[in-house]
Amino acid sequence: MPSSPAEDELVGAIKTVRDAHPEHGIAKLWAQLKVDNPEWTVSEKRFRKALATAGGTASGAGATAPAEKKSGKGKAKGKGKADGAELVARTGLDSTLDIDNIAPKVKAKMFGGTRGKGLVAKSTIEAGEVLWQEEPWIACPDPALAPHLVSKRFCAHCLGEFSKPNPPLSLECLTCTHAHFCNRLCLSRARPSASHHDLLCPGVNPLAGQLQSLIAGREWRSLDVVARIIAKWRYERAWGTQDAADEITRRVWEGIARVNMATRESEKADWATRADFTTRQWKLAHESIVTALNPEPFTLAAPRSTRGARKQRPLTDEEVSRWFSYESFLELLGMVNINLEDSGGMYALHAHLNHSCDPNIQVRNLPRGFVGPTQLPAPLPARNPPGVRGTHKLTMLARNTITPGTELTISYVNLELPRDVRRQALRDGYGFWCECVRCEKERVETEAAAQPAVTATADVVDDVTAKMDQLAVDQDETAVEDML
């Protein structure tokens, strides 16, 4: 019979699972805990609290079996045949990215059809080579880190762990107690990356209080990211430059794959049982965002960093509809849910990578100070030692030699899962049925293994049918003889 473990026993088991699977986010760690301890019953809420006690998640994708996002990133793309309809994301190439500068050996490509966009190699890439490193465009920590951020044990921007709380050179937010930073550099990057945005800081914008309470109370990370995206645009539109605001608009509405959240959820089997509650939660979240970021009239005082800047211009009807309508909120929420990376937030170039169950790219959150190999080919870096966290910077590494023109792929799910489980997880999380080379190979192998049993069954059926036919003939002949 399932039992509830003691708190210290649970925390110890979580640490063991986390150290063994540093690539996992919260959902996958919880699932692995249940696999390793089938006799336990542990709710997700209790697991999250115990995980926070244990110090949160370890790092990003691991060295042996990466499982990059959930919750998090990716595009609703793929091919589907007999498995049923798929969700096809609206997407396009991100014109705001200077890919040649970020990743010289990589280029973006539109594949067309349901696969959408992706990245391909421009030249030969050696095994172990670092293709690029990337900080989040929208930084957002895992909810499990919240207690450690408040206690000043982690940087609110880069998520680096301090050697001790409130170390020398570190700085705290001047208007709230929720954010602490490594140094002036991380503090200066907080607003541009939205890791701690002025318009969402309760000390600057009291109207954001309800929104922040909703996010914290439900550990609603995707809502948190939606709020940070809108705050980033709203700030630039009100006090920054029109060019910066337009760049955000192009990236969000033209360059990142998205599927409307209502469309994504309504096609799931359990939707009928939770539709009313979920819809009410969405509407409450939408109202909280409008209250915080677009009150009528818009009366926020300009943040300190903008004092003396140009006067605000009222939003146009088109801008209000695009950024603050309920339908747009569902679009943004759906976009975040298929692109959010467990380890740090939303990444602009990383979000172009498509899925394969036999990926040629590994994504890592490596410790601060990581230096790439000096000679190639090279082995992939070892997994982070227990207790050593990476920052929110992603490092893309080649798993093997990649030839020009080959698509770069990562795994969205745990590669150790069976084919059917992987494919169902991809369908539920990202909207597509995977038909990569590995999935097709395993399908053929499974069908071939089942064929002898099918053949044997068919032979038995044929034999029984033949005997029944002969019996029928004998009965007919007997009946004729009886009539004579």
Image (cartoon, rainbow, N blue to C red):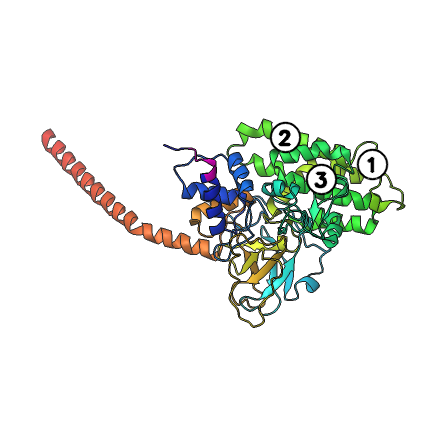
For numbered disc 2, what is the local secondary structure?
helix
Name the residue at 31% across, 51% down.
451
Foreground: 357 or 168?
168
**Can you tell which of label 1 and label 3 is closer to the viewer?**
3
Mark earlier in primary sequence (2, 1): 2
Looking at the rendered structure, the kind of residue marked 3 is Thr
| Residue underneath mark 3 | 177
Above or below, 177 against 167 in this view is above
Q: Residue at x 57, y 34 (%)?
A: 266
Q: Is the C terminus in the top left, top right, bottom left or bottom right quadrant? A: top left
Residue hosting label 2: 281
Q: Which residue is mark 1?
A: 300
Q: Nearer the viewer, mark 2 or mark 1?
A: 1
Crowding near the residue tagged with mark 2, few <14, some 14–19, many ≥20 C-alpha atoms within 10 Å: few
Label 1 vs 3, first from the N-terminus: 3
Residue 411 position in % (x across, y down)? 52, 53
Which SS does the magenta portion mostly show? loop
Magenta residue span? 4-8
Q: Position of residue 181 (x, y in %)?
A: 70, 49
> CA separation, marks 1 and 3?
21 Å
Q: Amino acid at mark 2?
A: Gln
